[in-house]
Image: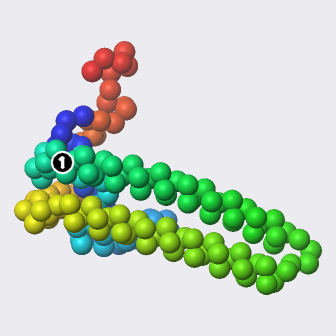
Amino acid sequence: MNKKRKLALGLAWICLASVASLNAQNTPPTLIPDMQFRMFLAENNLFEGRFLLRVKDDINLKAEQQKAIENMMLAHEESAITREADIKVREMKLAVLLKQNRINRKEMEKMARDISGRKTDLLVDHLNYLLDLRDILSSEQISKLDDLKKKFGHEFRDRWQRGPGHPENPPRGDHPANEPEDGSL
């Protein structure tokens, strides 16, 4: 997949929320708030580390910035995986408690508040991670990200509005159906 396509795919999720609101009737209800939140983050130049590394050449990311982003990304992902697993275990314990004939309401409330607090902590940590990533970028790099958002946002919105069967929306080159059957590239 060429660099321009990778960039387009990476930025596609940025514009998905605004476009999805136009087609909300065809979108699962839980998808819209998530996309709106991601759009809000992108509008405020809060991008995931993987995305910043994907567009590193377009925003002229320096080697030390790349290394810092990689280190922060790996540390954040490790922490998030551990915390999410801990939350899942606690949710399972709450489910077991709720299946009992007589539910200890104080214990149930304590467990629910604990889970909720841990989810809040996870969200706050994620937002801090995104803010830390943004702090690594120069104002010039953030400006380049703004330009990329505008450029690919309009292209993506136009494709979305035309729909998948429209003749001006050719199949993507990176789609598995477009690859040779013999596995060659």
The figure's colour scheme reads: rainbow
Q: Which quarter of the figure is the N terminus placed in?
A: top left
Residue 79: x and y in percent read 48, 56
Report the residue that reaches farthest toward the right.
Answer: 101
Give the number of callouts. Answer: 1
Image height check: is 41 above or below 77? below
Give the side of residue 4 with respect to residue 48, left or right.
left
Q: Nearer the viewer, residue 14 or 132?
A: 132
Query: Is residue 183 visible from the viewing direction of this image?
Result: yes
Q: Secondary structure at mark 1?
A: helix
Residue 117: x and y in percent read 57, 76
Q: Which residue is mark 1?
A: 64
Residue 96: x and y in percent read 81, 65
Give the side of residue 141 with respect to residue 25, left or right.
left
Q: Which quarter of the figure is the C terminus placed in?
A: top left
Residue 78: x and y in percent read 47, 51
Report the residue that reaches farthest toward the bottom.
Answer: 106
Report the residue that reaches farthest toward the left.
Answer: 140
Query: Is residue 56 visible from the viewing direction of this image?
Result: no
Q: Nearer the viewer, residue 163 or 1?
A: 1
